[in-house]
Image (cartoon, coloured by chain):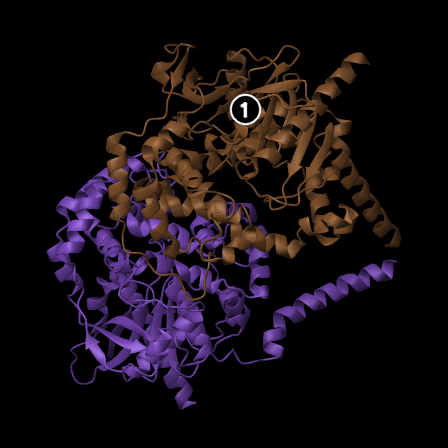
Chain colours: A purple, B brown
């Protein structure tokens, strides 16, 4: 009986170790997705051209009038419970001032002009008209222009990058390069078409964006992303290891079985996997579970019934405001949930946040944006399991203090074998490009310099 | 080492058995809640009387006009994905016909009259004006009138019982009793006030309803409930074992540690805990988990951010329709989720379902109704752990084929020591009183007869 126990323990240890090491022991290729999968109406197949058409955001008079009507005629608000900030969700006391600002003070014409400040285009890829911003830098001879794909997430939009784009597209002293930035709206978000049939998850969006970059003449390029943009970036870096020159992520995570095991260990004994000054970024297990329960109801709903809640959110601007801005409150600073005003203007102006709402409202895209959760969690897409494959693409993580998830480098390296380093920020939240554009742009420059050095070293070897 | 293993196994078995038997070994009393806790505005404390005022539902011209405007000016709908029924939630193709019916064909005046067909009242209990229907039967001498409290859940209302009330309040041959029914709107639902501060969960509602019954002159009474009504009933039967004469539940469940253990065992090996012809009512473990994931996103959201989604649902009637009717689709027949029309009129008329929507819309109570999830899952209320205490109140379960949860009698008896039996229906769903009022009423008569016999036997002993 004693021998049996020893044998069991031994088999368990060897089993876990093998499971962790398996990706290295049996290197397999990540799945190859159909590069031409058609997501648009079938009767358009073969009938769309590959042209790139200029695009401008338009706030029509009709849309503005209807929106103002809805804001002004909003239904009587239900008072929040006594002594409550944002703990039960968006505090209804804050709806009135926001709705008033949106309908009476937000300058639709000026903001439309602002949203059109960068050149924008649409081009049809795999049946979908994909909207994107493209800004090329003016550079002196000797400064190289390098292409960079910037990818937003939910409930953000290309608007998140408006402050950072000028910083990325002008040369910075100390760097011999500047960026040509390409900033697409995810399919189903803002001014990009939504898929007409099920299946378009983050990996398939990665395929579309690679096709977009190729169409713009960029065979090889750098990528950056946060939220869904970070997931798409990670999957692109895994699927297209020869094409992605480097990946900068502000929400770098890995979800292999082995990393999950380590995270669980870390949740119980942080000191085993994280430096002591970062221990508070690893939640203890019970706290992590309660955090997931408290803050991820939206994800649960959107992964299962996006079309149900979408009806209300696309019909009610105050409803959309409440649903989206709640995330800009708690995802910027979790502790803002105790404030009656949600701390919304702590780092953002009302115009900035309403610009982002306008991208969803004007395009009526909240329902299709939420479907991405359902697509990504479908059995079919989960079976792709792209996360389990490692990538040799050089990577860099910007880790804001208040990001939703934190993983230390020793976990990240399970997947990102060439993780060149991380920037641990003692400030900032989930929408870091939007919140701290200078910090964000500086970090992207720093990372891409290291990616370029990495490739030079490899070539020299 | 061998001895150590045997010892470990033995300790484990004894431990689990003790844990299961603990409530019986160490009988404790369930927590005593404050019978006078004040849920209304503090400045009203001591200033409200105990009078019972007649009440009528009123659909004002202003409300109807505003509602029709909203329905007719609904925003352009986002098309569903190709080949999809209700799998992504409410199919937007169905919004148009429902909105048209609601705004153009639903006869507000007639339906208002219909909703006022039973005597209704309001009375202030613990600071909240509680709305209820009260119908007394006309009986011949020799027929006893027994009081029965009927409790609805979410997203239902008192409307669920309108077809059953006439069947319960007239004498039925073979029974020497008929019911006086009292049908309250839960606090925060329909025409009952909502709490103004946190904490009003299902157990506290049980206290309010007991006070209501006492005020109506009923010291001892029978109770019936489904959904939240079933939870409240179970907690009333636990907290007030001397006052509740019997409990009929159409969603009888128990959630002790030991019952959960048995359910997990049953999920792996159904034959161990359930008769073979009922094995398909116990989900295998993986299927149960995926069912919880797929169908309970609304609960996750409402338990955490009810106020956020409430803003949209109280502002948009099509949004409210989609959010509530999705549940009347899948909770009636789970397989209806593959239908484009959600099978909504399979058992319900459009008027029936819109009546129920009107209860939420006219009272603007969707936000406060959803807060019950948050209150019930607060740490404070979960700590009450009323479920772990057993009750000797005689109980009966009506188990519809398509109910959300199924537990066999041998699990239910962990808590309901006097479970007199169950009716296993091979038809029907979650809203059984609404869907099959005759079956429902017959079962309530049958159960209450057994409860009365049970008490007689006990008295005779």
Residue A6 drawn at (x, y percent)? 81, 61
Residue B285 drawn at (x, y percent)? 66, 54
- Give the residue drawn at x 24%, y 52%: A353
Residue B212 drawn at (x, y percent)? 50, 17
Residue B240 vertical position relative to residue B303 in the rendered view, above or below: above
Residue B288 vertical position relative to residue A10 in the rendered view, above or below: above
Q: Quadrant of the N terminus of chain B?
A: bottom right
Residue assigned mark 1: B206
Could you say whether the residue bearing mark 1 is in a helix, strand or loop? Answer: helix
- Give the residue drawn at x 24%, y 64%: A164
- Give the residue drawn at x 84%, y 52%: B5
Residue situated in front as seen by the camera: B386 or A24 = B386
Residue situated in front as seen by the camera: A39 or A413 = A39
Residue A211 vertical position relative to residue B74 in the rendered view, above or below: below
Residue B132 visible in the displayed image: yes
Residue A331 visible in the displayed image: no
B43 with respect to A458 (left or right) = left
Q: Quadrant of the C terminus of chain B?
A: top right
Residue situated in front as seen by the camera: A12 or B53 = B53
- Give the residue drawn at x 37%, y 43%: B320
């Amino acid at each position: 009986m004693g021998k049996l126990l020893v044998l069991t323990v031994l088999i368990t240890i060897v089993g876990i170790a093998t499971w962790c090491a398996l990706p290295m022991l049996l290197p397999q290729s990540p799945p190859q997705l159909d590069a031409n999968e058609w997501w648009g109406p079938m009767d358009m197949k073969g009938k769309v051209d590959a042209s790139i058409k200029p695009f401008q955001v338009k706030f029509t008079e009709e849309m503005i009038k209807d929106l103002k009507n809805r804001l002004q005629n909003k239904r009587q608000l239900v008072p929040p419970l006594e002594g409550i900030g944002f703990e039960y969700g968006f505090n209804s006391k804050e709806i009135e001032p926001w709705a008033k600002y949106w309908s009476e003070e937000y300058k639709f014409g000026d903001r439309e002009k602002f949203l059109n400040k960068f050149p924008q285009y649409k081009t049809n890829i795999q049946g979908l008209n994909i909207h994107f911003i493209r800004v090329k830098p003016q550079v002196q001879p000797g400064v190289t222009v390098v292409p960079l794909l910037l990818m937003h997430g939910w409930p953000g939009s290309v608007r998140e990058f408006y402050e950072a784009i000028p910083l990325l597209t002008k040369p910075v002293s100390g760097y011999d390069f500047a960026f040509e930035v390409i900033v697409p709206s995810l399919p189903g978000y803002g001014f990009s078409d939504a898929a007409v049939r099920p299946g378009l998850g983050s990996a398939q969006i990665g395929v579309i964006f690679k096709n977009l970059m190729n169409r713009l003449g960029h065979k090889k390029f750098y990528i950056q992303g946060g939220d869904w943009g970070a997931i798409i970036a990670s999957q692109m870096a895994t699927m297209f290891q020869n094409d992605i020159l480097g990946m900068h992520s502000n929400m770098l995570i890995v979800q292999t079985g082995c990393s999950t095991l380590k995270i669980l260990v870390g949740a119980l004994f942080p000191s085993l996997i994280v430096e002591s000054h970062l221990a508070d970024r690893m939640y203890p297990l019970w706290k992590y579970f309660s955090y997931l329960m408290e803050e991820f109801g939206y994800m649960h709903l959107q992964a299962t019934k996006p079309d149900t809640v979408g009806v209300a959110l696309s019909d009610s601007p105050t409803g959309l405001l409440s649903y989206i801005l709640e995330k800009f409150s708690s995802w910027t600073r979790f502790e803002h949930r105790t404030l009656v005003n949600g701390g919304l203007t702590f780092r953002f102006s009302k115009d900035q946040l309403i610009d982002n709402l306008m991208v969803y409202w004007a395009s009526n895209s909240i329902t299709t944006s939420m479907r991405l959760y359902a697509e990504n969690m479908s059995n079919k897409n989960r079976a792709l399991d792209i996360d389990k494959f490692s990538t040799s693409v050089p990577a860099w993580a910007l880790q804001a203090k208040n990001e939703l998830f934190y993983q230390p480098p020793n976990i990240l390296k399970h997947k990102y074998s060439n993780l060149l380093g991380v920037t641990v920020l003692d400030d900032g939240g989930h929408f870091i490009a939007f919140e701290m554009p200078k910090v964000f742009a500086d970090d992207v420059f720093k990372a891409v310099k290291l990616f370029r050095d990495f490739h030079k070293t490899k070539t020299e070897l």
